Image: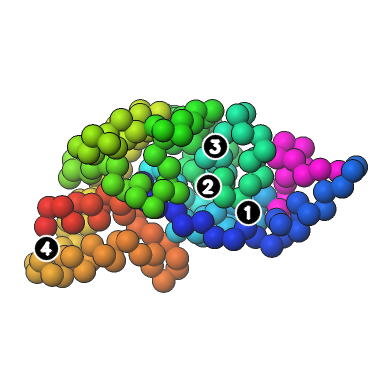
Amino acid sequence: MKHIKKGHEPEKFTNWKALENDDWKPSWDDNFQAPEKPIVHDALLKEQGYICCYCGMSITRETSHIEHLKPRSNYPSLSLEYKNLIASCQGESEKPPTVPVHCGHKKKYWYDENLMVSPLEINCVDFFQYPASGEILPTDNPDKKAAAETTIKKLALDIDKLQKMRKKAIDGALLAIEGLTDKEIQLLAQGYEKPDGNGQYTPFCAAISYLFKNYF
């Protein structure tokens, strides 16, 4: 999981919500559609560097959906609050439905303020460990361990599919450091924490960066 720094919501989204009057109210279910919805979706993808808010895999508009960090079912007043919106993998338009289910669709209506590790928390990366095997493990820090364990379980971040994808990304990164000095490896690790020239992060960059920082 990588920290997401939320920016300002798109101006067209702000203006659309400002049209509210006695006869019309903006609604996620009733009238949040084109052009406002894809504009918001694109803004979320851009600020996340085109990786899933939870697992870190590469995503596009077609392979992701707009996720409510705090579910609409329990927090209806936040359904159109930009700071509550993030982009998760497993797009709503994917057919047949993607199996196994993980990340936003697995989380579904769950949210626990004390046990949910949020990608909006600046220190969210500190809750997890990423060995070269591709696994995601909870931190050993007793103050963070329970939240990490619960989040991994509720979002299914430890399933075989994601473990294999993380391992593939890690293996590729390890090949790239062959012959480099320790200093060069650390510089490369810092590079994984930044988007490329197209504004895209390397898929599973949090796992790769963790490995480089802790084992090299």
Q: Secondary structure at mark 2?
A: strand
Classify 17 as above or below 103. Answer: below
Disc number placed over residue 178 in the picture, else none = 4
Label annotation for residue 74: none
Residue at 13%, 70% in the rendered image: 183
Disc 2 to disc 4: CB gap under 8 Å: no
Q: Which residue is mark 1?
A: 40
The residue carrying pointer 1 sits among few (fewer than 14), some (14 to 19) or many (20 or more) residues within 10 Å by Cα, namely: many
Q: Does dot 3 land on a helix, a strand or a loop?
A: loop
Q: Please identify, in this view, whether the residue under mark 3 or under mark 1 is nearer the observer.
A: 3
- Depth check: give the residue in front, 72 or 42: 72
Marks 2 and 1, how far apart at CA: 10 Å
Depth check: give the residue in front, 91 or 108. 108
**Which of pointers 3 and 4 lies earlier in the amino acid sequence?**
3
User: Which mark sits nearer the N-terminus, 2 or 4?
Assistant: 2
Q: Which residue is mark 3?
A: 70
Q: Indicate which disc, 3 or 2, sits on the residue closer to the N terminus.
A: 3
Tell me: 34 left or right of 95. Answer: right
Q: Amino acid at mark 1?
A: Val
Q: Is residue 81 left or right of residue 125?
A: right
